[in-house]
Amino acid sequence: MIKALVIDDELYAREELIDLLHDTDEVEVIGSCNNAIEGLKKINTLKPDVIFLDIQMPQITGIEMLGMLDPDTMPKVVFVTAYDEYALKAFEDNAFDYLLKPVETCRLAKTIKRLKKECQEQDYSPLVNEMLELIPCTGHNRILLIAPADIEIAYSDLSGVHIVAKDTKATTQLTLKVLEEKTPLIRCHRQYLIHPQAIREIKLLENGLAEITTQLGHQVPVSRRYLKELKDRFGLS
């Protein structure tokens, strides 16, 4: 059963969506709230698998709230909005899906089907007790085992966590947080890890940002938050 939290400032819309989710027999609504501040608290305490999040809310919008969540530990986010012009922005901000109000049963069923597939638990705990010697990845109906030394980049987007190696691009079920802790990869951006030995050039940009060019020519963003750590690592002033 998928555990869900519903966040919407409109009482009628919130209750209607909760009823639709109950009717699927696939989702357990473990909580609801009418604003983002309360929503952030409940996410931390209830640990839902997915949040159904309204976009237009007072004080803090749904998109602003998404930016406050840790991408390594946050639940799946399904935006619920009355305005389809927000859909592209939702996906740019790493949402799992979006639903237009009023929510249609058939469209919700497609979202639930995708959520069930994504929320199937896979136990990688035996792999993460020590430093990882190989990274399990999937792609093209096969399981790939990639050595951390061969990885240039790991990054997350809407569809998951991806590994870019010398001759391969694949998807892994491991989180960026696990890869950061259990491999030589280091954080350079909220959504990117880089192997230090893969760095060929660091280009300093405006507003405290930077961009890495890897040995294989990939471009990787560096955020202000991680630029100082990166410069300190290489003894740069």
Image (cartoon, helix red, strand yellow):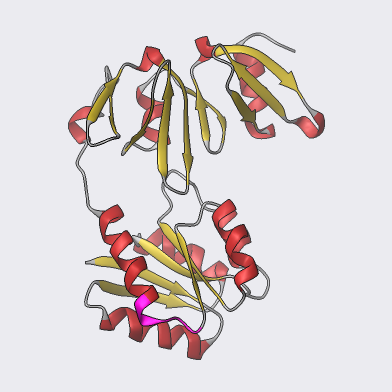
Residue at 56% x, 69% y: name it. Answer: 36
Furthest toward the front, the residue is 140
Q: Quadrant of residue 109?
A: bottom left
Q: Would residue 36 appear left or right of 120 to someone viewing this image?
A: right
Relative vertical location of residue 229 with respect to residue 106 in this rendering, above or below: above
The reply to whether residue 230 is in sight is yes
Q: Quadrant of residue 201?
A: top right
51 in magenta: no
User: In the picture, which quadrant includes the C terminus?
Assistant: top right
In depth, the one of 52 and 48 nearer the eye is 52
Relative vertical location of residue 4 with respect to residue 49 in this rendering, above or below: below
User: In the picture, which quadrant includes the N terminus?
Assistant: bottom left
**Horizontal and vertical percent position of residue 115:** 32, 60
Magenta segment, prevailing SS (helix, strand or loop): loop
Q: Quadrant of residue 136?
A: top left
Q: Which residues are magenta?
A: 102-106
**Horizontal and vertical percent position of residue 103:** 45, 81
Relative vertical location of residue 2 with respect to residue 72 in this rendering, above or below: below
Q: Would residue 88 appear left or right of 13 to someone viewing this image?
A: right
Q: Would residue 111 appear left or right of 92 to someone viewing this image?
A: left
**Horizontal and vertical percent position of residue 213:** 63, 18
Q: Would residue 57 appear left or right of 52 to someone viewing this image?
A: right
Residue at 66% x, 8% y: name it. Answer: 235
Residue at 46% x, 83% y: name it. Answer: 14
Furthest toward the bottom, the residue is 12
Residue at 32% x, 60% y: name it. Answer: 114
In depth, the one of 101 and 178 nearer the eye is 101
| Tally of numbered discs | 0
